[in-house]
Each structure stands twice: as C-alpha cells, then as structure tokens.
Image (spheres, rainbow, N blue to C red):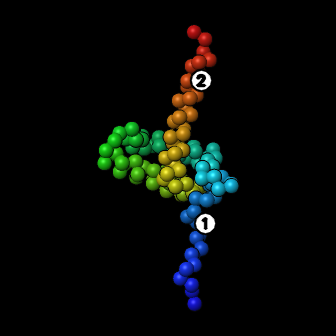
Amino acid sequence: MTDSNTTPEISNENNEDENLRPNGNPKAIWKSKPTKLLIEFLKRRKRDVQTLTKRGVTAKKVKAKLWKDASVMLRNHNYKYSPEQCAIKWKNIKRNVTLSKKKFCLKIPV
C-alpha cells in the first residue's frame, strides 16, 4: 500500500540540479561547450534576439519561446539548463562583453 503523503522520487533525467553549484547555491555552472552552443543558437535566431529589447505581449511570447527552444536545444546536446538559466546566461554574456569593451577602451592611450 502506498502512503499518500510520500513524494515520488524525481528522476534526474529532467532535473537541472547537476548544473547547480554545490552547497545549495542556485547559480548554474556553465562550461565552455554549452556556452558556445547557446551563442551559436542565438546567432541563428538573430531576429528573435533583437526582440529581446522590445516590450509588449508579442515580445514576451517571443522571449519565452526563444529561451524554451534554447533549453531544448541544449538538452538535445545532453546539457540540462532551464529556459530561465539560458536567459540569465545571455544577460551575463552581454554584460561581460560590455564591461570588457569599456575596460579595453580605457587601456588605449589617446
């Protein structure tokens, strides 16, 4: 007889836990290969990426689908990242590029 108060075991097959940092830190660990795959995916979806800066109902739908598709693509390559993790990673990539450009410009003597 099964106890109705017990939680069924969750298969690790669809679990993002393996990409999380130890000690319960919710930040995902992104290695080089999945990061490159994400960037290549976004290059192919350039029109959708351009929608990320827009607002409105249509833009929200495009954003949600873009990150879901990115997550599915990564899963097809055996990397388990959620759509939210993909969106955060892209935001961080853009921020790091901007910071690198600013830092580079400061080093160039005029």
| View extreme (bottom): residue | 1
Q: Is residue 92 left or right of residue 63?
A: right
What residue would you read off at disc 1?
12
Instruction: Please state, as top left, top right, bottom left or bottom right, where the C terminus lies in the image.
Output: top right
Q: Which residue is at 59% across, 70% downward? A: 11
Q: Which residue is at 54% across, 44% downward? A: 89
Q: Percent position (x, y) of residue 76? A: 54, 58
Q: Which residue is at 63% across, 49% downward? A: 29
**Above or below for 96 versus 6:** above
Q: Secondary structure at mark 1?
A: helix
Are the residues flagged by discs 1 and 2 in contact, CB closer than 8 Å? no
Q: Percent position (x, y) of residue 74? A: 54, 53
Q: Which residue is at 64% across, 47% downward? A: 31
Label of residue 45 in the image: none
Residue 55 visible at all: yes
Instruction: Please state, as top left, top right, bottom left or bottom right, where the N terminus lies in the image.
Output: bottom right
| View extreme (top): residue | 110
What residue would you read off at disc 2?
103
